[in-house]
Structures are given as structure tokens and as C-alpha cells.
Amino acid sequence: MSTADDLTPAERYADFRRGREHPVFRDFESLYSFPLDDFQARACHEIEEGRGVLVAAPTGSGKTIVGEFAIHLALATGRKCFYTTPIKALSNQKYNDLVARYGPEQVGLLTGDNVVNGEAPIVVMTTEVLRNMLYAGSRTLLGLGFVVMDEVHYLADRARGAVWEEVIIHLPESVSLVSLSATVSNAEEFGEWLETVRGDTTTIVEEKRPVPLYQHVMVGKRLLDLFADSDVDAAAGFVKEGAPVNNELLRIARDDWASSRMKDRRSPRGRSQAGGRGSAAKQVGNGRRVWIPSRADVIDRLDRQGLLPAIVFIFSRVGCDAAVTQCLNAGVRLTTPEERDEIYQFVEASCRNLPEEDLHVLGYHDFLDGLTRGIAAHHAGMLPAFKQCVEELYVRGLCKVVFATETLALGINMPARTVVIEKLSKWNGETHADITPGEYTQLTGRAGRRGLDVEGHGVVLWQPGMNPREVAGLASTRTYPLRSSFRPSYNMAVNLVHQFGRERSRELLEQSFAQFQADKAVVGLARQLRKSEDALEGYREAATCHLGDFMEYAALRRRIGDAEKAAARSRREDRREEVLASLALLKPGDVIEVPAGKFAGYAVVVDPGHSAEGPRPYVVTADRQARRLALMDFPTPVEAVTRLRVPKNFNGRNPQMRRDLASALRMRTHGLAAPYPGKGGAGKAPIDSGTEREISRLRTDLEAHPCHACPDREDHARWAERWFKLDRDAKTLKRRVEQRTNTVARQFDRVCEVLTALDYLEGDTVTSRGRYLRRIYSDMDLIAAECLRHGLWDDLTPSELAAALSVLVFEARRPDDASSPRVPGGAVRDAIAEMVRLWGELDALERDHKLDFLRAPDMGFAWVAYRWAEGDELDDVLGPSDLAAGDFVRWMKQLLDLAGQVADAAGDLPLRSTAREVVKRLKRGVVAYSGLTD
């Protein structure tokens, strides 16, 4: 930073003025050894002036400094500040950062797993914890002045995003909200919504990256620029859509395509590929295949070009672990002896509390071997303690390469010099889908460490069949808007009704971002509707007749036309029934006259073709055609005019048999008159007498109308017809507007109807049964509350209760993972069976009310939970289950959360002590050793 002596008198005066306007910011700014960016300073000024802010900026741009200023301002003014994050790992990381700056007395942590100094002036927490505090009316909220919502774009997450909107809506008005988001294309829309629900809010969008980002494709061992001009908008980290792609990449793509087309010609039949003219070693035309480097080759190439440290995104846990193994087998070593010693000491110290007997099953020694060479994996299947080691060593610059799944992109502070994306598709839970432009930007946005790198690099590995233009589209597209995933849950409904009553709750939910976006979409439809209504008035005016009300006359004409169409439709339906009935009477050997179609004329029935789909007779015609006819060939009913013997062994594919049968048909029908058009003829069926009388009456009214004699009648009629057509379109628009308006409130009403049917709500009152539900925040909240109400868990032991609760927590990663799970016997098996039956009843009730919240219970973790609660060793529990250690710990943590909620909800029931015993039994070994790592 410049000192006062370096400034001119004018600059010193301007600096003095700024300091006087924002004294707290001036004090805060002096804590940093570098000048703050303009967007950071602007956001801090807004906060100091008492406004909320939304800051949308690229990954690594330093937007968290704005959140840290809110903390600094809270301490300076004697208020509290809550710092919320979407995941526990981020909360822990932020807690450690803030403790380092302000000391452990000033900072607390609340994550569900950990409660550290919860009444401190600065408290870091997951967003769910703050939501639960708001519903419970916690005293910790007293004196709260600021809430920082880090990674607020997480509200688009389908599973948990609603929590962010709940917090934003329900925070007291006196609290200033500081929202930090990744770059999204509709930040202004989100900011506009924040202003409607939170009051004065300033939206600050920063597109420029602090470190330029260059995009590359690695083809073989060559690193090629993705774009023809690699400097274009590199500072922003993206190029404008339609920017020219590197011609060399386009040529390689053409050659790669040609090689796949010419593969057969390169290896002539009968010739060995080991040599000779047909050998694959010889290149034919432009059909050159691209050599695909191994993962070790990729790392070696990056290392030699000075592009480490790197994060390599592989969208598979197995792939990440395999990549580390491949590099170790290839002898990759990226650390010096001094670095290896430092890594070894750090990991040993960090994991010293892990039980010695569990180290083998956790893969500790392989993990340590990889890290000492500067290589590690990072994914949700890893033990939290291992992931924290990787994160810390990577930030220190000791771990050089991390093979990671996309979960690493969720805000954890691990910037890299280079980000490598191995493939541009990933498994999304249902299928392999291409990554979106937003995901691509989120991943590559980690490249380029502020203050350490001059430039960052995003690298995509070449794959067979890759289209460089599609990659360029991912790197340049800026349209990834934030979409709300908000929907009212059962727990939310009972808590809102308890606090505010049903009508006020409904109004609060109409303030959600989901409804705001739906209403914005309605704006366009409403504008169209207004235009249609204006045009309708003009059409009505143009149809005005001096003799009388022409719209009334036109309505009579339409009623006559509609009645005649309905009568014709009825006649067609009657005629079709007659046709089907006549075809159903056909037998082999019947001679019929096909009334229409390509094969009209006499034909003999070989097979009547009766089936569930309708009759399709197989016939031979007089000109030797054997065909199966369709219903469209019979506009009128048919009947047999005579009969003819068909040989039992008749084969329509035999020309001689067809000739013989056709000849017999011609002889039999020679001189026959056409069938009499009686019940099977083509006569027009009479109109129903009631309909005929109605049409006759309408015609009389029409002719008696004064406008019938108007000389301009047909001109007026054209305008009236336009009016009727536009009126029909306008009504459709109106229905669409009504469907989109109040969508969230309508869903809330349906939720309340379900709760009323189950006696959880009674008007504006939460019943005694409803108190169970108020304390349970799980996705399966209603099933858990019903189990409590029906006493399904009352007689279970702690281990059995752990197994029963696990079916409400666990979800198999893929449906086929859930086949034939092992379930403990005895009382718990009966309890789980009863829970599944209960879910079936609730699922039917939901369907009746057009809801779909509750998934089926999943028994895949029941045996593991039971054995762990019984005290089995980790190796014995994980061995038969195929669960990764990290997954095991994660599901156990969620099971602990639910057991704690059940204990709270049970009140003074005996179940309370059983649930607390579950918590005590599960919290041991690797589950207990989370410290501040999860």
C-alpha cells in the first residue's frame, strides 16, 4: 500500500475524506498488506452505511474479505456476527481462519457435530443450524447484527437449497445480510428479490478475475491453446461466445474422425497388424489416431512445464483412488526429502488419535505414501481426517497434485495453478451427462492463486471423438442462472404455523425467491394477456352492426356450427362401432367387398385377424394380392356376400396358392351385384332427433335476428370469428398465469391439508401430535414423527433403534446398490417392516394431495448401524458392507443428528433415554474422532 508520504496533497485530502466517511473500513483496510479491489471496497462501504449487499464474483477473487469486514464491523460496534456456510468442512476451515485472527475467545463454531463457544460474538455455523435457531427462537440470536451467507448460490441445490431461503425470509429485520455468491448470470434478479424481502440491498457484480485464466487442451503430450487468440478476455477467465477456436485443434479433430472412419481400410482382411503394408503403424490419409497419455504422463508433463500445483477433476471416487495408485506404480515423486519429512510429521500428528487397529482398514499407509510423494485423492468417500490433511498440505504447497471429484469445487479454499478436467461428462445419479457451462466455470475457476501465480490454466484432456467447438462453448458461455429449489416441507409448515399462524405463514412463503421467479415469468404472460384483451376490444368494435348486437348473432352461428360438428363426430363414432362389429363377425372363407383404400374390391378372408388391438383381416384380392388390412380400409361396415373354401395349408407367400385362390374368387363373384347399402352400406346415419330439433331452433333464432339482414354481414362475421379465436387463446393464457401465481402458497396449502388429515394441525394451531414434528428436520420428518406417535420404537434397544433410524437417513448411491440388504432380526425387523407399511400409507396420502416428498425407507445401512452400536470393530463392520470409510462416517454423522432430534422430540417418553444411548454408542472410534475436521 502507498504511504501518506507518497501521496500528493489532493490525494491525501481525498484519503482523509474517505477515512472520515468510513472510519471502520479504514481501520479494517490497514490489516491487509495489499490494497483491496474496488468491488471489495464498495461492498464494505455499503455495509458500513447500513445496507445489505449481494457480492457475485469469480472463485478466488477474494469476496470473503467482504464477509470478514462484516465481522470486523460487528466487533467494532458491539454486535454479533454469524458466518454461515453450506458444508461442515467450510465451517471448520473458516472457524480456524477466524480463530487465528481474533483468538479462540471471540470465535464460536456450531455445526451439529461441534459446539464450541456458541455464545461468542463471532459464530461460524452451517446454514441449517441457523435455520433451526430461528424456528426455536434461540436466545443466541439476541444482539445479532450481521449474517454472512457464504456460497449463497447454494440455494439452487435441490436437496438443501430451501434452507437458505428460509433463513433469508425469517431473519429479523434489524439484521444486515451479507450474501456472497459465485458469478451467476441473474445476480441482478437475485439482488432485486433480496431487496424486496430484506430492504435496502446493493448488488455488486465483479466479472474480472484477479489472476488471468488461459484455456488449453492436452493432446497427447502437447498442450494446445483452446482459442485462436489465447489472450482474449483471459483476465475475465472466459472469452466471448463465438470466439475462434485454435485451427490446430480443429485439424486434430478432423484427423481423429477420419481415423475412426478409415480403421477398416488401415487393416485389410487377412493381414497381420504386426507389420506389412496393412500394418496400423502406417498412416493412411489424415487418419491419425491421437495418443492418450496415462495419468502419470499428464502429471509429468505439467511438472516439466511448471504448472503444478494442480487439481485433476475425475468424476469418480474409484477413478481418483486409481489415479493415485497409477502414479505411485509409475514412480511419480514430486517432493523433496525435506518436504517428505514435513508431510510425514504433519500427517502422523493429525491422525494420532485414530485407533491403531483401524489404520489398515482405513488405508492409512497407502494414503501416507501418496502424500509424502506429493499426490493425493480428495472425495466424499475419504475419512474426514484424511481430507483435512490433504487440504492443509495442499494450501501449504506440499501436496502438488490432488485427484478430486466435483465436491471439491464447493467453496473449500484450495486454489491451484492448474485445473485439469479429465472428461467432460459425469454420472449425475441417473445417467452420464455432459457438464454444464456453470460447472465448467466453477471447476476451472480454481486455477490461478492470487499473490502466487501470474496466470492460471484450465486444461481439458483430449478424448476420442471430442469436438473442440463444444469445449469452447463450455468455456465461453455465460448463461447459468440461479434457480430457486425452494418448497415448503412438513417441518417448515408446523414451525411456521406455530409462530405466525397459517395465513401469515402463507404470506411469508409468497416472499420466497421461487415465487419471485415464478411471478417474473408471469410478467411476460400477463403482458401478452393485456395485449390480447386490448385486441379483443378492437375486434368487437370492428364487428359492430347498426342493426343489432352482432356478437350475439355470431355466437348463434358458432353454436350451430358446434352442434353440427358434434353431430358429425357422433355419427363417425357410431359408424366406427358398426364397422368393428361387422369385422368381428368375419370368418375364414367369407367373401367381402373392401369399401375403400388401395385394395378396394372383392376379397376373400383368410384370417379375420381378431386381437386386443382391434380386427385386421388378412385377405387375398381378385388381382392376387395377399394383404392384412387396417381399420382405415373400412370406412363403412362390411358383410359376407358369399363364401369360398380356403385351403387349410394356404400360404400367402406362395404365388401359386395366391393365383389359385384369386382365380376361385373371381369365378365366385362373377356376375354378383354390388351389396345392398342397408345396415352394412354407406348410407348417412340420421342425426339424433334431439340434436336435430336443437339445430333447427337455433337456425330459426338466427334468421329472426336483426343482423341476419345486414348487407355487411359476412364482413362483420370475419371480425367476430377473429374475436372468438383470440378469446380462446386469451383464456388459455389466463389459465397459465393462474397456474404460476401463488404456486408456493398452493403447495403450502396442500402440505397443511396432509398435516390436518393426520391431526398435526387444527386451523392455526399445532396440536400435541405436531410437537414431535417441530423438532425433526430430516427429509423423512413426517415418517419419523408418525413412528414416534405410533410408538413403533418404544420397545427397541439402543442398537435396534440405531438400525431403525438408519432407514430414514441412508440412501444408496445408485438404485442397484440397494438390492437385498441385510437387516437385523427380532423386534427391529418388525419395526422396520411397520415403518415401510407406514411409508406406504403416507405415500398414498401424499399422492391424494398431489405431493411427492417422502422417499421409500432404505435398509442398506441397518446392519452396519446395528453392529457398530453393538461395539463391533471397524474392520468387521466395513468388510462385508462395501462402504468407504468416509461414507460410513458421513452416514453415522447423519444418524447421530437424527437420533439427537428424536431424543429432543420424544420429550419425557422413555424413548428419550434410548435415543441418547444411541448417540453415546455410535460416537466412538473414527466416528468420534472428527474434532473440527468434518
Image: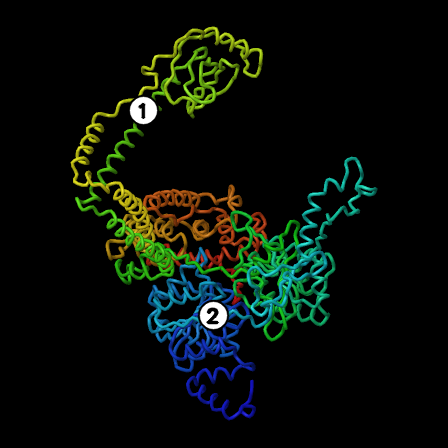
Give the secondary structure at mark 1: helix
Give the secondary structure at mark 2: strand
Q: Is residue 39 above or below residue 221?
A: below
Q: Position of residue 436 (x, y in %)?
A: 53, 56
Q: Which marked residue is nearer to the observer: mark 2 or mark 1?
A: 1
Q: Residues within 10 Å of mark 2 (few under 14, many from 20)?
A: some
Circles 2 and 1: CB atoms closer than 8 Å = no
N-term mark: 2 or 1: 2
**Could you tell whether 222 is left or right of 55 in the image?**
right
Split into 4 quadrants, where in the image is the N terminus?
A: bottom right
**Could you tell whether 703 is left or right of 389 in the image?**
left
Q: Position of residue 110 (x, y in %)?
A: 44, 68
- Of residues 353 and 491, the one drawn nearer to the viewer in this rendering: 491
Residue drawn at (24%, 49%) of the image: 540
Q: Position of residue 667 (x, y in %)?
A: 48, 6
Residue 639 lies in quadrant: top left
Q: Which mark is residue 205?
A: 2
- Of residues 869 and 2, the one drawn nearer to the viewer in this rendering: 2
Q: How many marks?
A: 2
Residue 495 lies in quadrant: bottom left
Amino acid type indicated by mark 2 = Val
Q: Position of residue 869 (x, y in %)?
A: 49, 54
Q: Which mark is residue 334?
A: none
Q: Residues within 10 Å of mark 1 (few under 14, many from 20)?
A: few
**Could you tell whether 80 is left or right of 280 in the image?**
left
Amino acid type indicated by mark 1 = Asp
Residue 549 lies in quadrant: top left
> Is residue 97 at least partly visible in the picture?
yes
Q: State the residue position of label 1.
A: 574
- Of residues 214 and 249, the one drawn nearer to the viewer in this rendering: 249
- Of residues 870 and 11, the one drawn nearer to the viewer in this rendering: 11
The Cα atoms of the two marked residues, 2 and 1, are separated by: 67 Å
